[in-house]
Amino acid sequence: MFNPTPSRLAQPALLPDYDRPFGLPAFNSVEDAIRSYDGDDAIYVLYPKRIEAAARMFLSGFPGKSIYAVKANPHPAVLKTLWATGMRGFDVASIREIDQVRAACPDAELYLMHPVKSRRTIRHAYEAGVRHFAFDCAAELGKILVETNDAADLHLHLRLALPVGGSASMPLEGKYGATYRDAVDLLRAARPVAAKLGVCFHVGSQCMDPADYIRALSYVHGLLETADIQINSLDCGGGFPVAYPGLTPPPMQAYFNRIQKGLKMFGFENLEIIGEPGRALCGEGGSTLARVELRKGQDLYLNEGSYGSLFDAAQCGWKYPVKLHRPGEVSEQNEGFRFFGPTCDSLDKMAGPFQLPADTREGDWIEICHLGAYGQALATNFNGFQSEATVAVIG
């Protein structure tokens, strides 16, 4: 699939030690990867240095312990990059994610923060060394206790449903989380059976206002006063954003500062504080290289689409940053294009518009950026269109 010449391959001396076992073809540039590719599918690109930089920012700036939300991108190269950078906790949701992290990072501390799990998943997790379990109702708490044989070393995390509102591009209310009244009863029920007890919440994916975290912490403070229960940990969840066109959040440090302010304001500083970044760690650390198969006016038909890594571009209308890669000159004038994916399904379209050179044509490669999170991880093999080509670009 990749037939690089020595001049095109990144020389071993340029690769960090932790890149070498990833098993990925490694290149100095996207152009080198394209020239070396003789396959017919899209190419998924990982930028380990960008992932490493994002991880270092959280490890040094977040006022607590950062654990990676594996669902954002479970690729072994992502997991190993994060581990090598110093990330030691991983938020998993399924047997497969547990096994994936154990294979890539055997000594990682795993947090099963999915509020609803199968009994088999709970058993498998406990046998695999997981001691952190989330729940949001009495039935789920009962399942955890039964399937772990009333283990005395559980760290239980009650998932709260936050009041409706906030600035998230993808609000999460409605599916998970205990209401205020139920949460009071659940905290009182869990306290005697938990070695450690905590609460967790999620302000919503792609949160655009750091003050949402202070509002959530205020809610937690009132709830704990009502319940009159002492907890050991507070998990601020995820929601940390990435800058997409039309979605420009404040700097990440503003989120850290607001969380720190809220922790001090409500007396939570002595608790174990946890955060679950996912998108923010790998979103800008990955992209998709899609080839133009046909142009019809302002419509570009690509070898990648919404059943591949472009789900959010189709379903949410997100206009990801794009770059054209073509040897030689390209038009200096940009125009707006609509994308269509390769499947037979008419829903496989991305309205955009995506700004590209006016002379974009068949055979060009388009790099759709910031797809390291919830892009590559959502790709399917529908209609036989599936890419297994992933490369690392270290330049």
Image (spheres, helix red, strand yellow):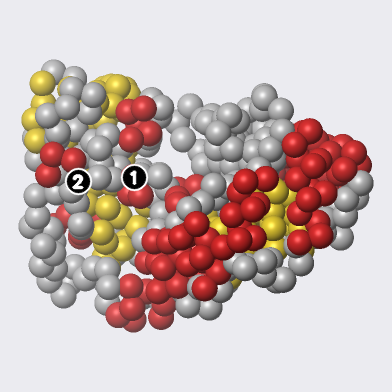
Q: Callout 2: 10 Å neighbours few (<14), some, many (20+)? A: few
Whether residue 253 sits left or right of residue 296 in the image: it is right
**Disc 2 and disc 1: Cα gap in Å?**
10 Å
Image quadrant where one finds the N terminus: bottom left
Left-right relation of 389 to 16 = left
Q: Nearer the viewer, residue 395 or 298?
A: 298
Looking at the picture, which amino acid does disc 2 mark? Asn
Q: Residue 264: x and y, percent?
A: 88, 49
| Location of residue 181 in the rendering, given as x and y in whole percent from the top left corner | 79, 33
Report the residue marked by disc 1.
Answer: 378
Which sits in the foreground, 205 or 183? Answer: 183
Q: Quadrant of residue 333?
A: top left
Residue 51 visible: no
Residue 163, x across and y down, in percent: 71, 28
- Residue indicated by mark 2: 381
In the image, farthest residue toward the top: 297
Q: Position of residue 168 (x, y in %)?
A: 59, 31
Give residue 367's quadrant in the image.
top left
Amino acid type for the residue under numbered disc 1: Leu
Comparing 300 with 240, the one in front is 240
Compared to 248, does 102 lie above or below? below
The secondary structure type at the circle numbered 1 is: helix
At 22% from the left and 28% from the top, the residue drawn is 348
Locate the C terminus and report the quarter of the image it occupies.
bottom left
* Cβ atoms under marks 2 and 1 closer than 8 Å: no
Would you say 172 lies left or right of 261 here?
Answer: left
Q: Residue at x 13, y 64 (%)?
A: 2
Which residue is depicted at the point 51% across and 38% down? 243
Q: Is residue 297 above or below residue 230?
A: above
Structural crowding at the residue carrying mark 1, measured as other residues with C-alpha within 10 Å and reported as few (<14), some (14–19) or many (≥20): some
Who's the residue at 18% across and 40% down the image?
Answer: 382
